[in-house]
Image: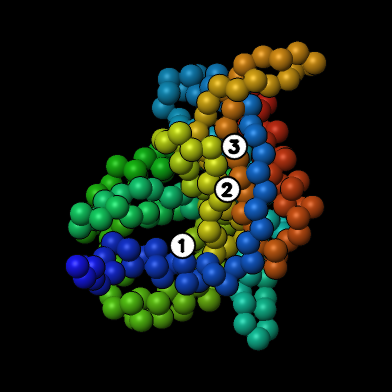
Amino acid sequence: MSPAVHPLPTARKGTYTFLRDARNTCHVFLMADVDATALKAARAATDGKASYISFVVKAAAEVVAQVPAARSVLTDGLRPRIAVLDEIHAKVLFDKTADGTRCVVSGTVESVQDRSVLEVQDAIDTYKNASLDDPEGPFAQLRRMQRLPLPVAGLVYRLAMRNPLRRAALQGVFSVTSVGQEPVRAIFPMISGTLGFGVGRIADAAVVVDGEIRVAPVFTLSLAFDHRVLDGALASEVLARTKQLLENWEMS
């Protein structure tokens, strides 16, 4: 029996176009386990309104804002250039269904450094609750691009990405993706920018605190970084400082 062959689904064109660009990035991956005890208490203080993702977005933005290389955008080519940005935009990934096909889409939380965790959550909820087919919704531009022929969509995407401010607005200074809804420990994201964080599922695990073993909620936080922009030592500091903020969270 011959296999059924179909054109690439329209809903997959956005991911396809993104990954062609992401293949130019020199990915290196790091990972660290995060004790989420303080985060659980902080989330409870918001009556569950703030998700763990909003805390990761806010913590990462606080760290990235202090590290110029981490908030840099590389424009590649014959004369590579790096732009250091002041505004920290975060790209957050969402699982959606379009035309009967599961696909990942993204939304940008702008100027995270100026937002509270609950304000970050409000921005995330705007994308989370939006329909892909709302002509006035936040995904309207994405849907128009998905309907373009792939060569045209790729050209439009590449032209937009040449401007570092436009790239940051569309792809974020950093990205955050999660597989926490499934019993999956970690995800190592593809990135087209400088940094991408991955969040695994929170589960009880044995941890050592002050020489004593106790059970605590733990999740794996991964970091993908572009080795052309920063080296492993600095990327490790970014991940370690983000982990420290999350483990010692205090609601302001």
Mark 2 vs mark 3: in front = 3
Q: Measuring 29% from the left and 78% from the top, which residue is drawn there?
A: 149
Residue 166 visible in image: no
Which residue in the structure is indicated by mark 1? 170
Q: Amino acid at mark 1?
A: Leu
Residue 40 visible in image: yes
- What is the x, y in percent for residue 50? 45, 30
Disc marking residue 197:
2
- What is the x, y in percent for residue 46? 46, 23
Disc 3 packing (10 Å; few <14; some 14–19; many ≥20) = many
Which residue in the structure is indicated by mark 3? 220
CB within 8 Å, label 1 to label 3: no
The answer to whether residue 148 is above or below residue 167 is below
Alpha carbon separation for disc pair 2 and 3: 10 Å
Q: Nearer the viewer, residue 67 or 17?
A: 17
Q: Amino acid at mark 2?
A: Phe
Count of marks placed on residues: 3
